Image (cartoon, rainbow, N blue to C red):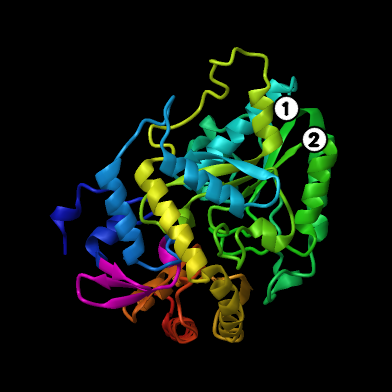
Amino acid sequence: MSHPELEAYWLPFTSNRYFKQHPKLMVSAKGAYYRTESGRELFDCLSGMWCCPLGHAHPKIIEALVQQAEILDYSPAFQVGNATTFRLAERIADLAPAGLDHVFFANSGSEAVDTALKISLAYHRVRGEAGRFRMIGRERAYHGVGFGGISVGGMVANRKAFASAMLPGVDHLPHTWNLSQMAFSRGQPAWGSHLADELERLVALHDASTIAAVIVEPVQGSAGVLVPPLGYLQRLREICTRHGILLIFDEVITGFGRLGANFGAQRLGVIPDMITFAKGVTNGVIPMGGVILRREIYEAFMHAQAPEYAVELFHGYTYSGHPIAAAVGLAVLDIYQQEGLFERALALEPVLEAAVHSLKGEPGVIDVRNFGLTAGVDLEPFSGQPGRRAFKVFEYGFEHDQLFRFTADTIAMGPPFISTPAEIERMVEQLRMAIRAVQPD
């Protein structure tokens, strides 16, 4: 059955031909649930796209959005400012690890990553080390879809069509997942810290004087919740410090409570030089992203030999620090604090862990991983049909009141912080039923 009214919209990261023959349309959302056009209530298993930890339609967020729109709906970001955005920057800096106390606003995770990469290049240049141009990413990493992000990213499907326009000089660390050594790990795997030493190999290959930054996700979310081995991130920090390389944590997913702390850096005990954020800062209600950076990085630009009226960094966006997004961000941070939701996420972690690891032994389940309020379940691909098994699990879930998220043959879960233990257990039981139900075509 065709749906000509759907034809004009080209959906992102979607099998458009299939979707337009089998459309799935949301009409409303409230709390931890979406409502479809058929009236079905779907539990939001991934907090939107990792971006709605407070659920949907929170009245305090709506009130803040409307009030700000009535007072100051837009203000230029260049050469003028507004108090709301300055307040949000201060609040975010207060949540960040010690020493990271300046914020540059963007509008998405992709923009935040490209901003951090550009700051890295410019920082080394103003310090007289313009030869540091190389960026080091990691296999299976997702850093958005800007040309910088896909260059340092390591998801092949996101890169191959655009290879001719990649940043020059980028290299990649190996990913940290090893099925034979860490299958069914609970929390951080004990094996794998030595994989960080691959950075020393890249330093020897390229020479540290050419490397500007290393960027990693504390937990690799879009690849299916790949959890860092114990000691791995600490080792990366040590190597970067020794060689004068900036360490960037992409916390677009892990920031704002997903790991039961303000940022993953604090949960994991490693302080990077920059943190990128987005998603949870506005609960997905309105786009916003940004970079939190060390004071020393900011000061290097401020102390450059240039007139006071000169622009220090030729970078920014029309909507950087948008006042409505900033007002929403302030309301969201208030709710996190007033309702104790980072602590709630931490308290729900063992509930999710126990539930997902009960899937061990189900047909086709080859690995289960969890950390914070995140979990990933790997399914054995159907022969000759990679990705098909997880897609069918997604379809089953949609018909049984669960909105699952899949990538390749992995089901990823990151339920809202407002979830109840019963909702999390029900989500996993429905996943169990889906895993048992799906069969090859």
Q: Tell whether position 341 is magenta.
A: no
Residue 64 or 144: which is nearer the viewer?
Answer: 64
Relative horizontal placement of residue 39, taking residue 414 as reference (left or right): left
Helix, strand or loop at mark 1: loop
Q: Report the amino acid beneath label 1.
A: Arg
Q: Report the amino acid beneath label 2.
A: Gly
The answer to which image quadrant residue 308 occupies is top right
Q: Which residue is mark 2?
A: 244
The answer to which image quadrant residue 123 occupies is top right
- Gap between marks 2 and 1 measured at Cα: 10 Å
User: Residue 180: x and y, percent?
Assistant: 74, 71
Q: Which residue is mark 1?
A: 132
Residue at 35% over, 63% down: 60
Residue at 43% over, 52% down: 329
Q: In the rendered image, which quarter contains the C terminus? A: bottom left
Q: Return the mark for residue 305.
A: none
Disc 2 to disc 1: CB gap under 8 Å: yes
Look at the picture and state if 127 lies above or below 51: above
In the image, the segment drawn in magenta is 28-48
Residue at 68% over, 56% down: 265
User: Residue 89: x and y, percent?
Assistant: 52, 44
- Could you classify mark 2 by the number of other residues whose Cα lies within 10 Å: few (under 14), some (14-19), or many (20 or more)? some
The single residue placed furthest to the top in the displayed view is 307
User: Residue 351: x and y, percent?
Assistant: 57, 83
Helix, strand or loop at mark 2: loop
Q: In the rendered image, which quarter contains the N terminus? A: bottom left
Confirm whether residue 169 shows in the render: no
Confirm whether residue 69 shows in the render: yes
User: Residue 55: x and y, percent?
Assistant: 39, 68
